[in-house]
Amino acid sequence: MKIKILVFCLTLIIFSCKKDKTSQVAIDREIKQYTIEQFMDNEAVYGGSFSSDNSNLLISSNRSGIYNVYTIPIKGGEITAITTSDSTSIFADSYFPNDNRMLLSADGNGDEIDHLFVRELDGTIKDITPTADAKSSFYGWSKDHKYLYYESNKRDPRYFDVYKLSIDNYGSELLYQNNDGLDFILMSDDENFFALSKSLNTNDSDLFLYNVKTEEMIKINDNMSANSAQDFSEDNSALYYTTDDGGEFSYLMSYDLNSKEKKKVIEKSWDIVGSSLTSNGKYMVVYTNEDGKNAVEVLDSNTMAPINLPNFGNKSITSVTLSDNEKWMRMYVGGSNSPSDLYTYNLETTEQHKLTSVLNNDIDVEDLVTAKVIRFKSFDGTEIPAIYYLPHQASTDNKVPALVLVHGGPGGQTRQNFNSFTQYIVNHGYAVLAVNNRGSSGYGKTFFKMDDKNHGEKDLQDCVEGKNWLAEQNEIDGSKIGIAGGSYGGYMTMAALTFTPEEFNVGVNLYGVTNWLRTMKSIPPYWESFRESLYLELGDPFSADSVRLKRISPLFHTEKVTKPLIVLQGSQDPRVLQIESDEIVAGVRKNNVPVEYVLFEDEGHGFIKKENQIEAYSRILKFLDKYLKNETLPVDGKTTNIEIPVVQKE
């Protein structure tokens, strides 16, 4: 189980695909520039739970400015608002299996303390996991549709137990008590077998099968490797799981619960990152991470042959879910230059319906940029993959400034999908190179482990080499290259400005770690199951590793920063505390270096409210225009530098 991607995740996820006709926009036509309001008027839609009669889908959408819950007819039609929150985002988990009650979830403005709620048939909403400061998550429904399963750390803040809750009276019973720091992954439909995981390091984890009747605990894997349970067979006779044992990439295996025989089921040249069987076992859905792009296959589980799915041209199917009767499929379809729309598809009749059009009608898709996967050699010869967005207006005669963009993690991956912020920056004349530095997931476990206890060092050099690659491109102004990132990418931004102060012209730090000693000591209690794995990768703050953690923490070296900086932070962030940003801003300002600070009181680790996204991203562009592009505007026949006030939004 690769857990690095769960730690300090970046909300700005970038995707790419091969250049197609969409990216070949003739530069002799005018490329229209769009405002941040226009880009943020794109709608983001997630989920898609089928109602019991397959007439509607339950979805989450941010069309109101924050996420609320909606229903939409399966064949298209009017979207109906179920919740109308104007403060806290609310997300759809699932329709109830036998009626139109709905299971919802929400936290407290980004504090990540999620609760589960039921929207009753009369429209009232009830918190069914009301314990204060306890985090709860939905697992699924029982086979007889009388219970729901959920996890909660209400008994012990460090560990998640599993509960079985009656959908009639909402009374719950403890099903699995986690005393050993294992992660509960899934259970068989008959509740006789639990699949459990034990993190060993940020790549590897042991997989266990627990027999409830005999209380026998069986270790599935023979060697240290990344193992992750995926699903039980419909007859509860086999466990499907992925492993990278003996190889670089994860492949799909089966384990016979009776004979204990293991068989390889599917192997690809990239990581198989997920697999599940449909309700009655007719189909198996397989997800593969192909060079940072989701590849989805739906297989006939008897023949293991892929079934035919609709062809969407230069767009891709990114996720699917099938109805309980296995006749309908909901699909998300999109690309790096087009946000994902929701479709339904009938597997028997092949009828197909587009349910959403999430791209703002004001935006011409021809003005947006399709990303390209590139690779460059780093300082030691290691090949580094990256995602490249080149503005349509860029040319040898019209060189553009550029940003190196660093993903979160550590161990995340810049991937191929649409991102409004990236397209906004590119649309306004900035090239973006999203670097998958060593330590990124998706490129084999050797590459994944390369940054262990090398953070802010070798992975930073990869980003510097990305800058050097940019500077060699004919369309790029090599004297105007900045670095940006969120979460761990924010740390890399500060590390670049601190430890390689002359390499980048500006830095954009979104909620980045600046003091590793404090961050590693203040991780949320519910990360306990993989705390030791984090320490193995990053360093134990309570040991001799503290010397290195201090050495790589930008906060203790702020006197080295000489280039303009903008910092953005959410005050509810439980992962990277507000004090991280407060202190780095105060330290750099002592150098008389231009520093802007934008603080949102109602955001956590990432900005989810549209009004805050508009504020944040417009401030970033203005900052870049002033300090990286050095843009001037005519005033009464003269030119003057754009002045941007340093305002703290608190």
Image (spheres, grey):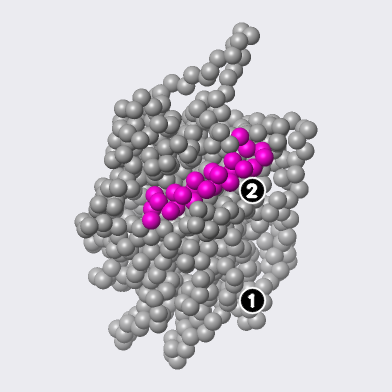
Disc 2 residue type?
Answer: Ala
Q: Position of residue 505 (x, y in %)?
A: 49, 34
Sequence-wise, the earlier of marks 2 and 1 is: 1
Span shown in magenta: 454-477
> On the image, numbered disc 2 is attached to which residue?
371
Residue sticking out furthest to the top = 636
**In front of the other: 511 or 165:** 511
**In front of the other: 325 or 198:** 198
Disc 1 residue type?
Answer: Asp
Residue visible at 59% across and 41% down in the picture = 471
**In front of the other: 16 or 402:** 402
Residue visible at 47% across and 34% down in the picture = 506
Q: Position of residue 50 (x, y in %)?
A: 56, 60
Proximity of marks 2 and 1: CB atoms separated by less than 8 Å: no
Q: Position of residue 502 (x, y in %)?
A: 45, 36
* Label 1 CA crowd tier, 10 Å (few <14, some 14–19, many 20+): some
- Dot 1: what SS? strand
Q: CA distance from mark 2 to mark 1?
A: 33 Å
Asked if the magenta segment contains residue 474, the reply would be: yes
- Dot 2: what SS? loop
| Foreground: disc 2 or disc 1 | 2
